[in-house]
C-alpha cells in the first residue's frame, strides 16, 4: 500500500466515524452578516468604486457610451500600442478609433506570444465598489484568463451602473462559482521585505478602467 492510499484510508475511516451531517450546506454557516456597509445611492456607489480603484493605482476614466471608442483609441495611442488582444465577443465598435493590429484570443497562443502583445481590451462581469475590485469570469467580452494576466497593459470597460455593486456579497450573487473567476484590485504588484513596490510581476503593469455610462449595444 502506497503512502497516498494509507492517507486516503485514514480519511475515509475518520469520515465514517464522524457520521452523516444532516444540516444542509446552505444552512451550515450563518449568513446574517452585513451585505453592504452604509446606505449609498447609485451615484455614491460609483464614486466609491472610482476612488478605490484609484487607491489601488488603477487609472480611472469616465465617458458616455458614444465616446467609448474614442476613449479606448486615445488610451491605446497614449500607451503606444501597435497590437491589441481582442476577446472573441468584444464589440468591434469599441476598437473603431484605433489602428492597432487586432490579435485574436486563440487557445494555441503561447505565453511568449501573448507577452509580445502591447495591450488587451476587455469588458468585465462585475465591479465591487467597497473593495475597488474588477471581476472577470471568462465571458465573451473577457476571453481566457491568461489574456489579462500576460500583456503589460489592460484596458477594462465597466458599464455604469449596471455592472457596479456595493459589496463582495452582492457581487457573488451575480457570479457563477463554476466559471473561471479572476478578481483584480489594481495593477499587478508585489513588494519585498523593505516594502519596495514592484508592479507588473504577476500581471499587467498598467490597469486602465473605463467607466462608461449609457447603453453600449
Image: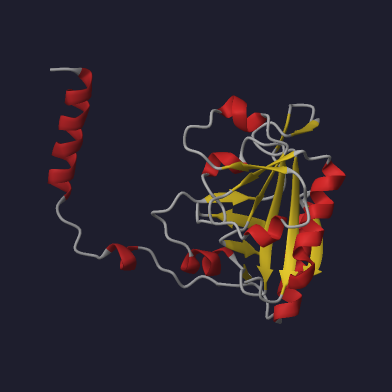
Residue 164 at what x, y percent from top left? 64, 69
- 114 left or right of 27 in image: right
Q: Residue at x 65, y 56 (%)?
A: 133
Residue 79 at what x, y percent from top left? 83, 42
Residue 156 at what x, y percent from top left? 68, 54
Q: Residue at x 79, y 27 (%)?
A: 194
Q: Nearer the viewer, residue 208 or 51?
A: 208
> The N terminus lies in which quarter of the figure?
top left
**Seen from this angle, which residue lies furthest right?**
78
Q: Residue at x 61, y 28 (%)?
A: 113
Q: Nearer the viewer, residue 68 or 171?
A: 68
- 24 left or right of 214 in image: left
Residue 51 seen in the current view: no
What color scheme is it?
secondary structure
> The C terminus lies in which quarter of the figure?
bottom right
Residue 149 at what x, y percent from top left? 61, 39
Is residue 38 depicted above or below 22 in this figure?
A: below
Quadrant assignment, res 91: bottom right
Residue 113 seen in the current view: yes
Q: Residue at x 63, y 35 (%)?
A: 150
Q: Nearer the viewer, residue 85 or 96?
A: 96
Q: Nearer the viewer, residue 70 or 17?
A: 70
Task: Tell how many labels.
Answer: 0
- 164 left or right of 125 in image: right
Quadrant assignment, res 112: top right
Amino acid at each position: 500500500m502506497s503512502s497516498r492510499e494509507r492517507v486516503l484510508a485514514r480519511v475515509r475511516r475518520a469520515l465514517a466515524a464522524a457520521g452523516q451531517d444532516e444540516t444542509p450546506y446552505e444552512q451550515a454557516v450563518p449568513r446574517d452578516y452585513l451585505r453592504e456597509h452604509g446606505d449609498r445611492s447609485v451615484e455614491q456607489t460609483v464614486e466609491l468604486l472610482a476612488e478605490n480603484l484609484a487607491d489601488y493605482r488603477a487609472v480611472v476614466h469616465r465617458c458616455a457610451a458614444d465616446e467609448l471608442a474614442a476613449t479606448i483609441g486615445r488610451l491605446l495611442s497614449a500607451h503606444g500600442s501597435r497590437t491589441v488582444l481582442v476577446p472573441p465577443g468584444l464589440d468591434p465598435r469599441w476598437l473603431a478609433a484605433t489602428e492597432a493590429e487586432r490579435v485574436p484570443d486563440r487557445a494555441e497562443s503561447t505565453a511568449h506570444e501573448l507577452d509580445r502583445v502591447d495591450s488587451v481590451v476587455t469588458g468585465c462581469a462585475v465591479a465591487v465598489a467597497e473593495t475597488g475590485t474588477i471581476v472577470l469570469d471568462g465571458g465573451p467580452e473577457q476571453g481566457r484568463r491568461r489574456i489579462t494576466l500576460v500583456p503589460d497593459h489592460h484596458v477594462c470597460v465597466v458599464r455604469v451602473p449596471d455592472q457596479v455593486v456595493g459589496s463582495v456579497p452582492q457581487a457573488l450573487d451575480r457570479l457563477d462559482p463554476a466559471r473561471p473567476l479572476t478578481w483584480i484590485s489594481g495593477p499587478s504588484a508585489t513588494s519585498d521585505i523593505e516594502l519596495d513596490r514592484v508592479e507588473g510581476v504577476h500581471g499587467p503593469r498598467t490597469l486602465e478602467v473605463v467607466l462608461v455610462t449609457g447603453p453600449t449595444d
